[in-house]
Image (cartoon, rainbow, N blue to C red):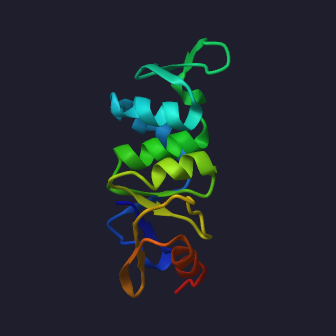
Amino acid sequence: MIKIYKKKAIPKSLELIKINDQYFNKYTVELLDERAAYIIEKIDRSRMVDKFFIESRFDGTKINIDKLSTGCKTALNIMFNPDKIFDISECGENALEIIYTLEQGNVYCEYPMIAFDMTAVKAIDADGEHLFTDYEELKEWWKNEN
């Protein structure tokens, strides 16, 4: 289940990553395995050829994996680095839908970024952890910064 952090509740033991493209290109790409193929297909509608290349959805050309969208890179960062918190402010709805289904991971954003089909998330603020299964309740929690 994804954990959402408010800024004041981010533990000192977890690093907040705001520049997802750079982090992916420098660190996460080395961690990729067959699990990444599903994420790449769902978000960017591209096929993962191997750890460093994808097949373009437009013409089938083999291109460097660093050409993935920021939303896709963010989802992969979250999936492969559960010991970090990733800012999801640059993610589109297609990436959010996948991020909110991940079994684990940590996210942050200054404003509500919620997938319409979200099922359950843990939200962490200065008052502790809260479990949300309703879109509107999570949206309201997010608006009320502690």
Which residue sits furthest right?
A: 58
Q: Residue at x 55, y 47 (%)?
A: 95
Query: Left of 34 or right of it: where is 17?
Result: right
Quarter occupied by the N terminus: bottom left
Residue situated in front as seen by the camera: 95 or 21: 95
- Is 32 above or below relative to 75? above
**Residue 132: x and y, percent?**
42, 74
Query: Left of 27 or right of it: where is 44?
Result: right
**Residue 43: x and y, percent?**
55, 38
Query: Left of 60 or right of it: where is 107?
Result: left
Residue situated in front as seen by the camera: 74 or 7: 74
Q: Residue at x 40, y 76 (%)?
A: 124
Residue situated in front as seen by the camera: 114 or 145: 114
Q: Quadrant of residue 71?
A: top right
**Residue 125: x and y, percent?**
43, 80
- Is 80 above or below relative to 48? below
**Residue 12: x and y, percent?**
36, 70
> Would residue 133 be seen by someone viewing this image from the given angle?
yes
How many marks the image carries: the answer is: 0
> Would residue 21 be seen by someone viewing this image from the given angle?
no
- Is 92 above or below relative to 52? below
Q: Residue at x 57, y 75 (%)?
A: 136
